[in-house]
Image: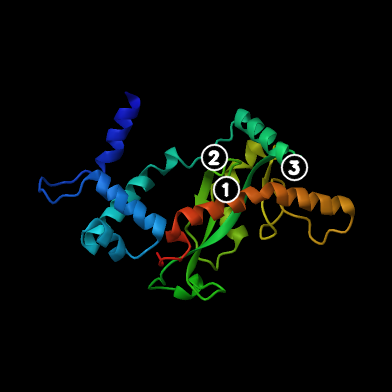
């Protein structure tokens, strides 16, 4: 009964506000939006598949996207209870023996159209405009935290200090565990990065174990962009 009630609530935002026969059904709106997310194609191509106008396709995509955004807290969360911490430490240690690991953090560029103002700060080294998107995932490649607010010119360490991730690892939780990041992040009491210029065998071994454990976030980003081509510029730019 609870699942049925949730389904009705999820569909409420997409229900047509008119009784006209031409009003699009919820299923049609979701299909059109998913097609756009998956292909990254222009809205006009998506509209042709649904046999609707480009404006109608745009409206469907906007409605579905807004509906997902309003429910983001139900799917993107970073529980830091003691039980969850212990559970994550155990499963991460099974990968390569790295202890006290909670999750991994990384960033990726998501292409976007040039904004009207300050377009230069969105231009990356590859010659296109993009956002510097920061993500944290768990061992199952589930995204637990994401920040999409900053242009590509923003440094990773700056974004990290502005996000909610910082609060998860400071205060009562400080020194209880590690978040794994690459060399683009600064090392801290809770953020562990590879050792710079390793020399001794234990240092090389540490970096190898670090890389073997942290690669889960790279896999997560790869799967995300393969599944949603609208994020990788292969079919168009957001």
> Which comes sooner in the sequence, label 1 or label 2?
2
The quarter of the picture where residue 182 lies is bottom right
Which residue bears the numbered disc 2?
Answer: 78
The quarter of the picture where residue 176 lies is top right
Neighbour tally class for label 3: few under 14, some 14-19, many 20 plus, Cα within 10 Å: some
Left or right of 24? Residue 58 is right
Looking at the rendering, in which quadrant would you find the C terminus? bottom left
| Residue drawn 66% across the image and 52% down it | 181
Vertical comparison of 139 with 187: above or below: above
Looking at the rendering, in which quadrant would you find the N terminus? top left
Q: How many marks?
A: 3
Which residue bears the numbered disc 3?
Answer: 96
The location of residue 214, given as percent across then percent down, is 67, 49
Q: Residue 93, can we see it?
A: yes
For discs 1 and 3, the disc positioned in front in the rendered view: 3
Left or right of 1? Residue 219 is right
Neighbour tally class for label 2: few under 14, some 14-19, many 20 plus, Cα within 10 Å: some
Q: Residue 188, can we see it?
A: no
> Which comes sooner in the sequence, label 2 or label 3?
2
Q: Are the residues flagged by discs 1 and 2 in contact, CB closer than 8 Å?
A: yes
Vertical comparison of 73 with 228: above or below: above
Which residue bears the numbered disc 1?
Answer: 136
Q: How far apart are labels 1 and 2 at the CA level?
A: 9 Å
The location of residue 77, given as percent across then percent down, is 50, 40
For discs 2 and 3, the disc positioned in front in the rendered view: 3
């Amino acid at each position: 009964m609870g699942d049925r009630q949730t389904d009705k609530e999820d569909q409420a935002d997409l229900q047509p506000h008119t009784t006209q026969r031409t009003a699009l059904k919820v299923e049609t709106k979701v299909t059109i939006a998913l097609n756009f997310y998956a292909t990254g194609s222009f809205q006009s191509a998506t509209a042709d598949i649904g046999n609707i106008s480009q404006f109608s396709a745009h409206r469907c995509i906007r409605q579905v996207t807004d509906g997902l955004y309003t429910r983001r807290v139900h799917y993107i969360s970073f529980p830091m209870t003691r039980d969850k911490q212990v559970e994550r430490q155990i499963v991460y240690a099974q990968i390569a023996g790295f202890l006290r690991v909670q999750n991994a953090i990384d960033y990726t560029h998501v292409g976007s159209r040039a904004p009207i103002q300050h377009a230069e700060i969105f231009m990356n080294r590859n010659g296109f405009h993009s956002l510097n998107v920061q993500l944290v995932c768990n061992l199952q490649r589930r995204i637990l935290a994401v920040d999409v607010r900053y242009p590509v010119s923003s440094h990773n360490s700056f974004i990290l200090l502005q996000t909610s991730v910082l609060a998860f690892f400071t205060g009562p939780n400080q020194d209880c565990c590690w978040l794994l990041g690459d060399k683009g992040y600064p090392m801290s009491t809770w953020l562990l990065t590879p050792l710079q210029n390793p020399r001794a065998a234990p240092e090389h071994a540490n970096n190898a174990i670090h890389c073997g454990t942290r690669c889960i976030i790279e896999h997560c980003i790869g799967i995300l962009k393969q599944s949603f081509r609208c994020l990788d510029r292969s079919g168009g730019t957001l």
